[in-house]
Image (spheres, rainbow, N blue to C red):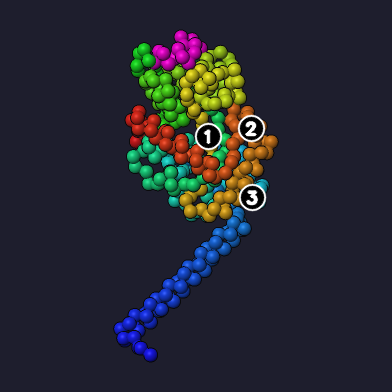
Amino acid sequence: MHQLPRSSRSFLIGAKTSLSALLNRRQALGVGAGLVLASGAAVAAGFPERAVTVVVPYSPAGGVDIVTRLVTTPMAEFLGQSMVVENKPGGGTNIGMAAVARSTPNGYTLLTASNTLTTNKALYSKLNFDPSTDLIPVGRIGEAPLVVVVNAKSPYKSLAELITAGKVKPGALSYGTAGVGSSGHMASALLERAGQFKGVHVPYKGGSTAVTDLLGGRLDFMAINPLEVAGHVSSGSLRALAVLNKSGSRLLPQVPTARSLGVDVQATVWWGLVAPKGTPEAVIQTLNAALNKALTTPAVTQTLADMGATPLGGTPAQFGSFIQAETRELSEVIRAADIRAD
């Protein structure tokens, strides 16, 4: 029988050894992957084993704080563990968002996100975290539309008249907001873009001070949560021109939507729960299920209705798609208007 040269025999032996080592490595990787999956399942099966902290990046007693405490109460019952609300205001919500983004991704630290999750990356030039990648969706809580209001003595009786005035004299209309990059600011910027006019932004340290100046005739208009002005509209101190969503406002049912008036603007205040990147998918699903159950409880649905808000819920993927779409749109608006918060 013909014998292969020594060099060829050595090559074949080496090849067999390499193949055996490769197969062993693949088997090891398979075992490792199985252990990871088993570990994830074990975490989900035992989750939660202690209290879950929900960070609110605003001061206590505000709208986001109220909504958070509203939904986490029934969520805690469904999860069988307490949910602790921790307020971390400041930095345009960046302090609270960064704290959660840097926390251990195990489901025990969450954030109640709102509009700033989709705007702050474009508004701030120096962030020590990335809102679009370092925080992942758990589920939407709900939303409330914004409404355009003017002083009752204003010459503008309709949204069309307000927009026409802005076009005739660019920069003549002033509008107040709760601050640079706030939901009211973004809504007003969207209205400017849709109406093709340019107003003068007057930022305040809170919406209530801006409303006071609107009532005093020192501002031309505001885009604001109806909850903050419904009383003034009812009393006749303010006039509501249009609601900036598709379906109108429960608090101001008689006010038309901007879209029904031919102005394509969609602007809402919204809330949802997010978690640090890397949180196990099974844990996210457990939290999402508890949130969806909470949103069907009578206490939650009635309170949100009283606030003029609509409960939403849905899957993490649906919430993620919403976040991505809103981030793209508002980032374009921010860049086009050269809006900066730092």
Task: Answer whether residue 162 is magenta in the image.
Answer: yes
Residue 220 position in % (x across, y down): 43, 16
Q: Amino acid at mark 1?
A: Trp
- Name the quadrant of the N terminus: bottom left
Considering depth in this image, is 64 or 195 the residue closer to the camera? Answer: 195
Contact check, label 2 and label 3, Cβ < 8 Å: no
> Is any part of residue 231 visible from this angle?
no
- Whichever of labels 1 and 3 marks the residue nearer the N terminus, that label is 3
Q: How far across and down, in percent of the image, does residue 247 sit? A: 57, 25
**Up-down: is 278 above or below 211?**
below
Q: Which residues are magenta?
A: 152-166
* Disc 1 target residue: 270
Picture quadrant where residue 143 is located: top right
Name the residue beneath numbered marker 3: 79
Q: Is residue 40 visible?
A: yes
| Residue 329 % position (x, y) | 42, 33
Distance from the alpha carbon under mark 2 to that under mark 1: 15 Å
**Of 309 and 5, which appears nearest the observer?**
5
